[in-house]
Image (cartoon, coloured by chain):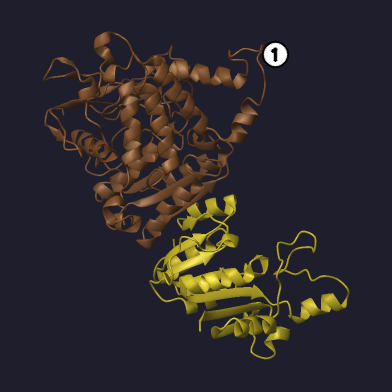
Chain colours: A yellow, B brown
Amino acid sequence: MMPNNVNITNIITEFRQDFAIIANWVKFGSKILDLGCGDGELLQYLRKSLEVKGYGVEKDDANWLACLKNGSNVIQMDLEDGLLGFEDQSFDTVILSQTLQAMHHTEDIVQEMLRVGKEVIVTFPNFGYWRNRMQITGGRMPVSKILPYQWYDTPNVHLCTINDFDQFCKDHNISVLERRVITDAKVINFMPNLLGNLAMYRLKAA
Amino acid sequence: MTENISVGTHSAGTGAVGSGSVGIVAPKIAHFNAPLTLKSGAVLPQFDLVYETYGTLNADKSNAVLICHALSGTHHVAGKHSEDDKYPGWWDNLVGPNKPLDTNHFFVIGVNNLGGCHGSTGAASINPATDRPWGSQFPVLTVEDWVKSQALLADYLGIQQLAAVIGGSLGGMQALQWTIAYPDRVRHALVIASAPNLTAQNMAFNEVARQAIITDPEFYGGDYYAHGVVPRRGLRIARMLGHITYLSDDAMGAKFGRVLKDGVKYSFDAEFEMESYLRYQGDKFAGEFDANTYLRMTRALDYYDPALAFEGDLSAALKHVKAKFLVVSFTSDWRFSPARSREIVKALLDNQCTVSYAEVTAAHGHDAFLMTGAQYHAILRSYLSNIEIGNNDAK
């Protein structure tokens, strides 16, 4: 448990690099749905820092249990089946953090998020990051901290670049409210598709 | 109100029933003299509820957990009645010291529902107006009536608010109903392998079971007590049917397959292991359960439908719920399928209730809720250990 008077910025370094930016995009006390919430770390962070009313969705048994243990509300279901059971516009923000690239039904889940959430946050590893390009140029599939898998055991099936996702939003009539690109916790403004490792989008239905 | 409701002494020194057991327990009877008006309008002039408790009620009475039983359950949830008992209570794997529902922390109450046949007032009890068994005259009960009577038992035990109500199947309906009927009297509801109402198919099984009983020549319209017989054949078939629906196809296949006991005999005897199992279960049940109770339990299942008064809108029915929820379903449960549990979850989400939902991978079908699957029990243990006692942590 964190004491209330601790400065949040001092704590965020302990968390995943994208958490602080997500927290900036989430309103205090709002209603949050975190899809593919893993062990519930982000939910717990948002609950403690912003007193959100949060729910997680998680398929994996061990992750689900970890969520329950840390006091998160967690619904066990497969995102590939959509967000059946969640009403239209019933959440302030729906988050899909570093999970988009592992989804089979990519278009469906983005549409479902835009249906359920007034706003949507999507983050994904930027496949256009120069280190990934270097590895490809060297003849091998990229393996890195953010893409830790070998080609044969990766859950990632829909990797994309920032330019790809921008085009996706245009094609699907999705408004990009804000975009942040970061590499090792540093915000990248110059040539983000080349120099950015993690892409973060705040979206809403146009 | 004068009895000592602590049974803490039962949990120690009875090594014969094994560690983690609540030990040797004894049922108690609560007598209620005030008339109870039922949902049907019928009035029970007075009634008894038989119950057991495990663990110790704490000073501010904030650690009480009620266990609601399903179709054929009883108040005897955990422990044994004597060292010689072959089996412990029906949910002994859940309840005891250091078990998922830890009696070192919680005061656990098991109660035989009204209309039951294990000590609470039911059709076999004496009707004070006639000095004869109630039989066919015993009213048809509902889940709402049970919960009302359970709340009276909580009053009797001096408990204003339950830390949790837990139930599987029909018991889960009672847990749900508690949160609707008494939103301020229950902090957590664990609704397991349950549904917000029965589907037509599910009710159809109940109807076949009841027809088996009612058409048994020894049923005598429900007044078989006077004839010194019981409708064994009907009850036996009802139970056999039930058992088929409590198991998944895979579980039955794994348990019995097509195994023959002693080769093909070209007869209608119990040649397959599966047949032996069903006959054994049917016979056992027919020898110990009351047919009038079975009729009423299945009817309570059929009638329960909290959304009915809200034009089928379950979210509206749960509007005033305050309890926090754990909803659990099992993948192979086709009698109370995960989809039905998800309806409860959706209605809770619509009301911004605190809820977690687990869809446990299990091969056993509906029966899985009484088993000890590692993930299932880890879920129950984790959820229950997070329940605060000693203060009110309701929403």
The part of the image, by quadrant, that contains residue B287 is: top left
Q: Nearer the viewer, residue B65 or B37?
A: B37
Quadrant hosting residue B112:
top left
- Residue found 63% across the figure and 66% down from its top: A105
Residue at the bottom extreme?
Answer: A190
Q: Is residue B107 visible?
A: no
Q: Tell me residue B319's x, y (percent).
A: 29, 58
| Residue on which the image places disc 1 | B263
Judged left or right of residue B368, residue A137 is: right
Q: Horizontal and vertical percent for residue B171?
A: 37, 37
Considering only vertical position in the picture, is B85 above or below B100?
Answer: above
**Side (left or right) of B390 relative to A95:** left
Foreground of the two, B244 or A83: B244
List x then y, in percent, for residue B45: 12, 28
Of all residues, the one furthest to the top in this rendering is: B228
When the figure is inspected, residue B368 is found, relative to residue A82, above or below; the finding is above
Determine the secondary structure under disc 1.
Answer: loop
